[in-house]
Amino acid sequence: MMKRNIYFGVVLLVAAIGSSVESQAQMDAVVQYNPNSIDPIPAYEHHYRSRVWRRVYLEEKQNKGFFAVNAEISKFVIDLVKNGEIEAFKTADLVNTAELKYSNEELRGLLLREEAATFEEWSPTTPYDAGNIVTFNGKKYAATYPSTGDNPETSTAGNWEINESAGEAREYNAREMTSFQIVEDLIFDKRRGRLYHDIQAIEFIIADAESGAVKSFGWYRYKDLEAAFRKYPEKAIWVNRQNYAQNKNFADAFLLRLFKGYLVKVENPDDMDIIAMIVSSGGNWREGVNETYRQENLLMEKEHNLWEF
């Protein structure tokens, strides 16, 4: 009888060890730490996780701290791009492949409102009308009156004037990036018993002040942005409109949630934003807007309920 008990004890011990090893192998197969997180929470500590998209409008009063004149967060990012100090991606997934990642040349191309123009060399046999632009001996000239054969460099009839700014490339400025979009994970850490906002990426959006067109200026890994905010504290300044002695670093402003972002999308199997989901199911735009507020309230309620965990 004693030998039989010892035998069954050994079998149970081996089974327990095998189960533990299998469980550990399964856990190791899952990526436990998000490489895009500043302070990653291991997956085995996640009691709840949801990814959300928020739109931040910089011209709103609550967000003006990120959009102070000559201290815009958009200006900060543009400078990083021009200096080649940051990477940008075409989607919020931050997939690091040649197809889904912008080269610095492509990224700088997104800043162009108009590309630089080239003009023909002045010819003595070509008739020119007022407004025509030509080049001659490395300079640009604009015709002020119709003429033929009048050398723009030696003209005394007033038919030409130097116009070196003609045809220059025109870029969007920082004040035209009036909004950005945040992608963040809402994670309830079951060990620490609280909800964390883990920002993954930010997309800056250009609103053309002349044409009204809107386009993306790329998705940026927030981890890279945060490092740049810390590297250049003299430029990354969130302005406290109530007390300039308490201006903060952009990184701290994000950490303290000193912005107002409108909920655009909650992670879902159809990968659709909230308004699009409502419209596709027969609703209208107004109902979609109401649904965004309802979803925001549901997230707040979820956080409240998780505190009881």
Image (tube, rainbow, N blue to C red):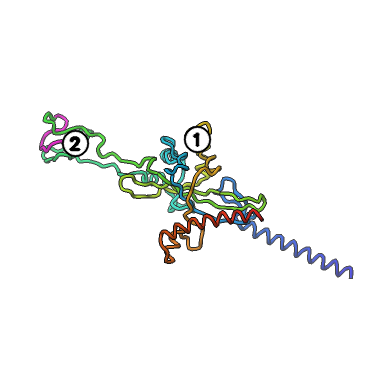
- In the rendered structure, does residue 139 fall within the stretch colored magenta? no
- In the rendered structure, does residue 146 fall within the stretch colored magenta? yes
Q: Which mark is residue 242?
A: 1
Q: Position of residue 269 (x, y in %)?
A: 50, 63
Disc 1/disc 2 C-alpha distance (Å): 50 Å
Left or right relative to 113: residue 129: left
Task: Indicate the amino acid at tag 2.
Answer: Ala
- Going from N to C along the chain, the mark reached first, 1 or 2, is 2
Q: Position of residue 139 (x, y in %)?
A: 22, 33
Report the residue marked by disc 2. Answer: 142
Q: Which mark is residue 259?
A: none
Q: Position of residue 277 (x, y in %)?
A: 45, 62
Q: Residue at x 38, y 40 (%)?
A: 175
- Residue 177, image quadrant: top left
Look at the image and give the residue range highlighted in magenta: 142-154
Q: Residue furthest right?
A: 1
Q: Residue at x 68, y 62 (%)?
A: 22
Name above or below for residue 159 compared with residue 220: above
Q: Which type of secondary structure does the marked residue at label 1 adopt?
A: loop
Q: Residues within 10 Å of mark 1 (few under 14, many from 20)?
A: few
- Residue 159, image quadrant: top left
Q: Is residue 156 visible?
A: yes
Q: Position of residue 296 (x, y in %)?
A: 52, 55
